[in-house]
Image (tube, helix red, strand yellow):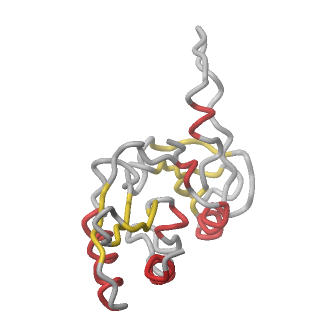
């Protein structure tokens, strides 16, 4: 591997998501690639969690500042296709979410694409409470603190919590 690419990956591994600071951009799957472009310049490829993500400008600024601090010249390329999916989240990232108090997505986005529709709606996801582990939870609001999360409440410990929706 090109030493510049390896250096850039190491520098970027320290960057955290501005909305969920317990996760790195790599944990979340936003940081897609660091590569040498055809012109020889380094490119950092990112994909926002959704096209209207309000944090993407901050993420780009953080990447630029981190690379500059390390003396690394690179351009940032934002790719919207393929669209970001929770399938790109690392297992470590899912564990970090749970420990932080946000329930990670329960199903893979690939599974959602194969759901067949029936006359009756399928049973909603069982989302375990990240505080006590109970599966006696209910969705309180389809949207939580950000559009990519829903608000849930545990019926046992009565604590509210965010659920990171699968995309």
Q: Would residue 59 appear left or right of 121 to someone viewing this image?
A: left
Q: Is residue 7 above or below residue 38?
A: below
Q: Quadrant of the N terminus?
A: bottom right
In the depicted structure, whether residue 51 falls above or below residue 26 = above
Name the residue nearer the viewer: 40 or 119. Answer: 40
So how many labels did they put on this image? 0
Residue 146: x and y in percent read: 38, 55
To which quarter of the image does residue 116 belong?
A: top right
Q: In this image, 38 relative to 4: left or right?
A: left
On screen, residue 144 above or below 91 = above
Name the image quarter holding residue 106. top right
Residue 39: name its quadrant. bottom left
Q: Position of residue 118 (x, y in %)?
A: 60, 11
4 or 33, which lies in front?
4
- Tell me what residue is drawn at x 33 percent, y 69 percent: 59
Q: What x and y, as percent, mark residue 72?
A: 34, 85
* Closer to the camera in the image, 79 or 144: 79
Q: Is residue 164 left or right of residue 15?
A: right
At 61% from the left and 61% from the top, the residue drawn is 90
**Coordinates of residue 24 in the picture (x, y in percent):** 50, 72
Residue at x 35%, y 84% (from the top left corner): 66
Q: In the image shown, does 133 or 89 lie closer to the viewer?
A: 89
Quick one: which residue is furthest to the front in this view?
A: 39
Instruction: Please name the residue shown 30% across and 72% down the image.
Output: 41
The residue at the far top in this view is 119
């Amino acid at each position: 591997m090109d030493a510049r690419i390896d250096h850039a990956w190491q520098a970027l591994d320290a960057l955290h998501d501005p909305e969920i600071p317990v996760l790195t951009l790599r944990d979340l799957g936003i940081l897609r690639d660091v590569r040498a472009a055809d012109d020889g310049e380094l490119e950092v490829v990112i994909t926002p969690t959704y096209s209207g993500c309000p944090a993407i400008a901050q993420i780009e600024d953080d990447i630029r500042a981190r690379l500059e601090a390390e003396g690394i010249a690179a351009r940032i390329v934002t790719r919207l296709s393929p669209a970001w999916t929770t399938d790109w989240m690392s297992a470590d990232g899912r564990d970090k979410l749970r420990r932080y108090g946000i329930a990670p997505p329960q199903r893979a986005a690939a599974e959602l694409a194969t759901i067949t529709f029936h006359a009756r709606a399928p049973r909603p996801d069982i989302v375990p409470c990240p505080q006590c582990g109970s599966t006696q939870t209910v969705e309180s609001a389809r949207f939580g603190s950000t559009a990519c999360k829903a608000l849930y409440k545990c019926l046992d410990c009565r604590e509210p919590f965010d659920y990171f929706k699968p995309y």
